[in-house]
Amino acid sequence: MSSKDGESGASAPRKTPILVAHAGQQASGSRRAYRRPADQEKDKSGPITDSERAWLTRDCLLRYLRATKWNVDDAAKRVQATMGWRREYGLEGFTPDYISPEQETGKQIICGYDKTGRPCQYLNPGRQNTDASPRQIHHLFYMVERVTDMMPAGVEQLSLMINFKPSKKRQNTSVPVSTAREVLHILQNHYPERLGKALIINVPWIVWGFFKIITPFIDPVTRDKLKFNEDMKQYVPAEQLWSEDWAGQMDFEYDHDTYWPALNELCKQRREAKLARWSAAGQIIGESEDYLAGGTDTSVTGFKYEGEAKAGLEEKMAATTLDEKAPVAEEPEPLAAVTA
């Protein structure tokens, strides 16, 4: 596949994310020292913000209810815990510049969609380029947030693609058990029902031992989603599966100066589009993610998103391009009990 969406047969490898899922799929800078943004010390208390209200969609609340087997009190406690974690962690304050040094070698890549329309997030431990630090974990969850930006209407899960193939610079691609436990804790408690599949290849013996150690900490439902060393074309269409190591047909080459601004600009535009739809419908808690993503123009309240606002937004989104030759803009009350 070429570097430009919708074209094929070109010799140059793709260097940007894929804009949309395949038609047959169905929903189910230079290196320098960056510091963590100065305003990251957040207080977990305080009134709910607009961004938190927008995050509290109907589908978000349903994910917590499913994760707690429909126990409303437990779901409410977990939602509150996640909101506190997001504030304390400073998740919304992570910037592309802050994360950029972790991303320079392409050790995480968001590109392509699986057969159910879930965006694919590739993890490449062999491309590790930094020493262990909190920012390494910040990088992972920054990218998980970007994956949610890339989810089409009707899709609320991702496919995690992990390649443990070693490189010349890094032979041991395992991670400390303490780090793995922290990551699992965050995924299971603060991103419930978000993992669709975890497709894992090139698993060396030391990593097999690592998985055996952490297996007791993995929820049984999550364990069933792990697929090791299979033919991954069962799950991802060949044309959207990375050719490197994955036996797919997507010719992709990581170029940080091209990929990183393109990904962040695309995700920024999609967040702004969702926010515009949320604001137009009254900024309510419990809005439909299908409505926010453009799968329907009818809000949960019956509001119709149409007219000049819709036309203007569609025109802006239609102009979105990942053509590598194009310039990329710089980044500049039943529910009340759950959110009280």
Image: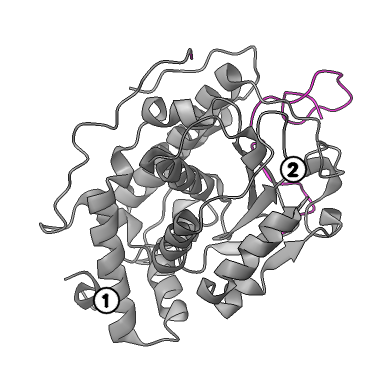
Magenta highlight on residue 170: no
**Amino acid type at mark 2:** Lys
Q: Estimate the x, y position of residue 210 in percent, counting from the top left.
A: 62, 61
Badge 1 is on which residue?
Answer: 77
**Residue at 54% over, 12% down:** 327
Instruction: Tell us which disc is closer to us: 2 or 1.
Output: 2
**Amino acid type at mark 1:** Lys
**How is colour applied across the structure in the image?**
one colour
Front position in the image: 148 or 317: 148
Badge 2 is on which residue?
Answer: 165
Q: Eyeballing the image, is 41 above or below 69?
A: above
Figure quadrant of residue 262? top right
Front position in the image: 61 or 68: 68
Q: Estimate the x, y position of residue 319 in percent, counting from the top left.
A: 56, 25
In this picture, residue 248 sits left or right of residue 123:
right
**Residue at 45% over, 34% down:** 269
Extreme residue toward the left, this view: 46
Crowding at mark 1 (Cα within 10 Å: few <14, some 14-19, many 20+) = some
Q: Estimate the x, y position of residue 219 in percent, counting from the top left.
A: 54, 76
Q: Estimate the x, y position of residue 166 in percent, counting from the top left.
A: 72, 39
Q: Quadrant of the C terminus?
A: bottom left
Calculate the distance from the C-alpha at mark 2 to the C-alpha at mark 1: 40 Å
Figure quadrant of residue 44? bottom left
Highlighted magenta segment, given as a residue range = 1-29
**Residue at 44% over, 53% down:** 292
Judged from the image, the secondary structure of the residue bearing numbered disc 2 is loop
In this picture, residue 335 sits left or right of residue 134:
left
**Residue at 32% over, 46% down:** 91
Judged from the image, the secondary structure of the residue bearing numbered disc 1 is helix
